[in-house]
Image (tube, rainbow, N blue to C red):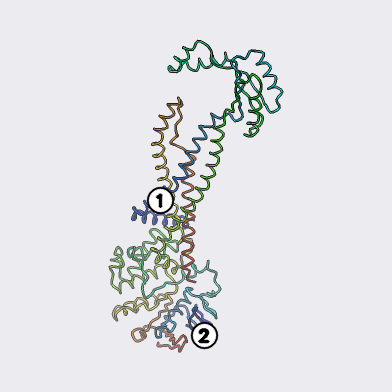
Amino acid sequence: MSIFLSHHVQAIKLVVMRMHHNKLATFMISLVIGAALCLPSLFYIGVNNLSKLTNHMQNETEISLFVKLDANAKTLDSIAQILAKNEAIQEFHLVTKDQAWEKLKSQSDNNSETNGAINELTKNPLPDAFFIQAKSADPVALEALRVELQSISGVDQALLNAEWAKRLSTLLALSKKIIGLISLLLALALMVIIGNTVRMQILTQKDEIEVSNLMGATTSFIRVPFLYAGMLYGAFGGLLAILIIVSVLQIFNDSIAQISNRYSSDFSLSLFNGPLFLTIIAAAIFIGWLGSYLAVSRAITSFKLN
Amino acid sequence: MIKFDQVTKRYPGSDEVLKNVSLNIEAGEFVLVTGHSGAGKSTLLKLIAAIERPTSGTVLVANQNISKLKSSVIPYMRRRFGLVFQDHKLLYDRNCFQNVILPLHINGINGVDAARRVRAALDKVGLLHKEKAMPITLSGGEQQRLAIARAVVSRPSILIADEPTGNLDASYAADIMAIFNDFNQVGVTVITATHDVQGMAKLTNRILHLSNGELQSKSSTS
């Protein structure tokens, strides 16, 4: 056990020493890994934040039914009855023009711009409205229901609220698939990059491998330093990737804060994303290990002297 | 200790380098393998050191059949040997001390014990004062002595040297043969390939002469 441990300690020492001697080369390799890891991660963060943003805007199956302004209580009653009979409707509730008016006023109390405008209105401009939850979330069924509701007499307008949000979320789902694909391709590229780097290093240490082999070094003895090298390249690359991501987010956050201010929202990108960062580093280390493993195994096979 | 039984070796695309060689080397012997270049000396040594496998016949080292060893066992077999090559095969990216310590690391020996043994080996070949020097700064004879220190540091029972004096002038060559003789005195089996029989013969117990891959004679000089 102690032999095993000391062998690994020796290997790490050796690798760190070599990296120390070739700082620039080590940095360049790590940078390539870092930049490659950045792309899918930033894409992921973007899509993730967009879907967070749309999630609270989107009430999946809600249809708003605005009643004509001159409608009286009787019309409302008859519409309510028709809605109650409709099989496709899960539930609905009525917000009368007075309720809506009160709500709007209280909401605008702490907004000076709209407050002034609303106070100038002498008459309530809002219609009565039914808010309807459909049973189905299927866009086609929803659209059919909307058209049906539109045709009820006394109804001014039927609106599918979350139409654009829904389209966006479909796009986001697509983007997630694309991210998956890009990450996979970049992982392959990384493996090749790291594998190639390790292969170059193997060429410069060809003599050492050959001599060690002749002196009775086992395959794992020869392999271990290279595996650590690959893992360290991966780890450095992962750290660089995180550094780049945080910088990019910081730059974007200023503009995003300005935009969300305009929409009186406090939305911003969170700089620290623990699970993502851990995933990046773990993935980078794993890819580094795998790339080196493949490269060093290939090299050892070609050096095989038996 | 080492037994060849009708061993033939053929490399892909070449004639037989060794033909029907049978021999027996006892523990503690000092054997010279002689012959012209191309006679098969290096191949014979490589077969002993488990670097090559015979095309036919059997090679037994310490009662283990080299040709039937699994590749995973071969590294452990090789640790029985100390190898010295004509071209030294030193590692030029590290100093003398680090060159000599490599076999110990391979054997899992580290720390103070390893350092002590490295210094003992360097002392034996007269290079203790050069432990921090890089191999490239050493003379040809010193480099070969460094290679010998590396070969013996893990205390192998068999020392195999392929033309260790090939590139050296006579006095250096005599130094190196004297060192080999010292090891042989303490019980190490020494097998050396050389084309320079004259300079060596007086030190050896036995000469194996190869000619075109065939073993010619076994003569004893002492």
* Quadrant of the rendered image containing residue A61: top right
| Amino acid identity at mark 1 | Val
Q: B202 or B173: nearer the eye?
A: B173
Q: Is residue A151 toward the left or the right of residue A287 in the image?
A: right
Characterize the local packing of mark 1: few (<14), some (14-19) or many (20 or more) Cα atoms within 10 angstroms.
some
Residue displayed at 47% across by 78% down:
B27
Q: Chain of mark 1?
A: A
The structure residue drawn at horizontal position 44% and vertical position 74%, both measured from the top left corner, is: B158
**Residue A32, label in figure:** 1
Q: Chain of mark 2?
A: B
Residue A149 in picture, x, y percent from top left: 65, 25
Horizontal side, residue A83 vs residue A301: left or right: right
Residue B20, disc: 2
Q: Position of residue B161 (x, y in %)?
A: 40, 76
Q: Could you tell me how far apart the alpha carbons at marks 2 and 1 are, in whole angstroms?
A: 57 Å
CB atoms at circles 2 and 1 under 8 Å apart?
Answer: no
Q: Secondary structure at mark 1?
A: helix
Q: Nearer the viewer, residue A140 or B116?
A: A140
Residue A143 sits above or below residue A224 on the image:
above
Against B118, residue B200 (above or below) is below
Pointer 2: residues within 10 angstroms few (<14), some, or many (20+)? some
Q: Position of residue A107 (x, y in %)?
A: 50, 17
Q: Residue at x 45, y 34 (%)?
A: A270
- Hey, which quadrant is residue A239 in on the image? top left
Spot occupied by residue A292 in the image (x, y as percentages of width and height): 46, 57
Mark 2 or 1, closer to the camera: 1
Q: Is residue A286 visible?
A: no
Residue type at mark 2? Asn
**Farthest-out residue, top:** A122
In this rendering, the answer to whether A138 lies above or below A284 is above
